[in-house]
Image (tube, rainbow, N blue to C red):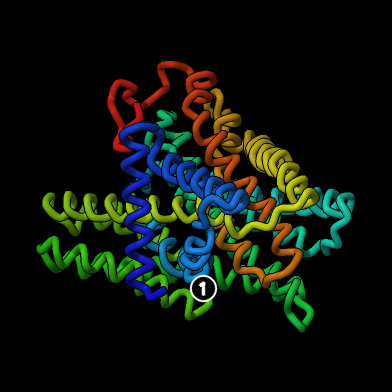
Amino acid sequence: MDLFSILAALLTLAALFSYLNYRYIHLPTTIGVMLIALVGSMAIVALHEVGIVDLEEPVRVLLSSIRFDQAVLEGMLSALLFAGALHINLNDLAEEKLTIGVLATVGVALSTVIVGSATFLIAGWLGFELPFIYALLFGALISPTDPIAVIGLLKTAGVPKSLETKIAGESLFNDGVGVVVFLIILELATGNEPVTVGHAAGLFVQEAGGGALFGLAAGYLAYRMLKQVDNYQVEVLITLALVTGGYALAMRWHLSAPIAVVVSGLLIGNQGRAFAMSDTTRVHLDTFWELIDEILNAVLFLLIGLEVLVITLDVSIFTMALLAIPIALFARTAAVVIPLTLLRPFEGRNEKGAIPVLVWAGLRGGISVALVLSLPPGEIRELLLGATYAVVIWTIVVQGLTVPWLVRRVIPEGSLTADRGRKTADGGS
């Protein structure tokens, strides 16, 4: 299929499913679109199996025309991360910097080891010859929380401001850290030359540190340009160039593009908003990036729902997929509880109910699916794809839909920040 036909099909389906969700299901848009796509995919498989109608082949043709990993990691991710970072208050982020930094680094590393070790043992028990390094690779791709899913959830959860900053900040930064860890382990797994500890540490510093510095420089350049013009069309275009051009350059220079775009988004969303924009520009900029965020989210979660058609499921893979859910949940619990306990002498006590909300709000999404689909085809990828998909669907549907309930149960009433009487943009309440 040509590019225009692919875009037309995806946007049409995303619009149709968003309409059906808004009119009849009343779930948050991303979850509703994904569920409709997921149920539709299962229905297509069922109709194909009974021989009533064969819609599976056209959908498979569409999916085969899309490199999901490239579409997410080299396309949608830059805009989605920038849109999320644009609305994070830098002062609030600075107050929680120690917690966010530890969760995004130590937490990811700890979860990677726990998930990798448990997956290696269970895969062996099920009869799979899964090398430990590939089990760690699964741990790396499934450990970071997805900022795209998490930030959308926070719009309706009503958590206290400081806890919201922890959740959003961690998801924005551990995404970039997780991708870097994934790339290091992938080099260990597939490279011809042995990777030393020094090489791995240097690669991490280059990717993460270099990405942050590049994002700061690119963001500052855009900030200076914004300050010298007063035309919202030009200013919106500058931010669009910052996102696309900056992300592409960071990737070309082997820097962490996700971290770069988050840093530049924070700079523009704070310094740029305060000192380089008129009120008119702020309104148009926010509207533009909110619309981009909603459209790309709808398309991304549509693809997640449709990608079930590419999964090979036999009894062993299905069993591994089901067991991956408690493994990931246990690892997430450890990755939150242990670092926050160690930080208590420095940070003081966390808000009441912070730990269960941080654990349960650790959603996984398109980034995990994209990373596992970037692996070379074969039995290992089929196994890890099934496990990844199970964790993603569980966290988005089950955890995502029950986080507001959990917040009401564990957070004191006076701390809640959301206006429960206000209808949200997703059509929920």
Q: Residue at x 63, y 62 (%)?
A: 372
Quarter in which the C terminus is drawn: top left
Q: Where is residue 166 in the image (x, y as percent from the top left)?
A: 49, 40
Judge left or right: residue 197 versus residue 96. right
Q: Position of residue 233 (x, y in %)?
A: 14, 64
Quick one: label 1, few (<14), some, or many (20+) residues within 10 Å? many
Is the residue 91 above or below the residue 195 in the image? above
Residue pictured at 45% horizontal, 43% vertical:
36
Q: Residue at x 72, y 38 (%)?
A: 326
Q: Nearer the viewer, residue 131 or 377?
A: 377
Q: What element carries label 1?
A: loop
Q: Which residue lies furthest to the front in this view?
A: 52
Instruction: Say what amino acid the circle numbered 1 marks.
Output: Leu
Is residue 338 visible in the rendered structure shown here? no
Instruction: Choose between 190 and 386: the one closer to the eye.
Output: 386
Image quarter of residue 155: top left
Depth check, front residue: 165 or 237: 237
- Residue extending farthest top: 413
User: Residue 279, image x and y in percent?
Assistant: 13, 49
- Residue 292 placement: quadrant: bottom left
Q: Residue placed farthest to the bottom in the image?
A: 192
Q: Quadrant of the N terminus?
A: bottom left
Position of residue 3 relative to residue 19, above or below, is below
Say how many tags the image has: 1
User: Pointer 1: what residue?
Assistant: 255
Decide if residue 270 is on the left or right side of residue 308.
left
Question: From what the image shows, is residue 274 above or below residue 1?
Answer: above
Q: Is residue 44 left or right of residue 414?
A: right
Instruction: Give me the residue at 30% from left, 21% from top.
Output: 421
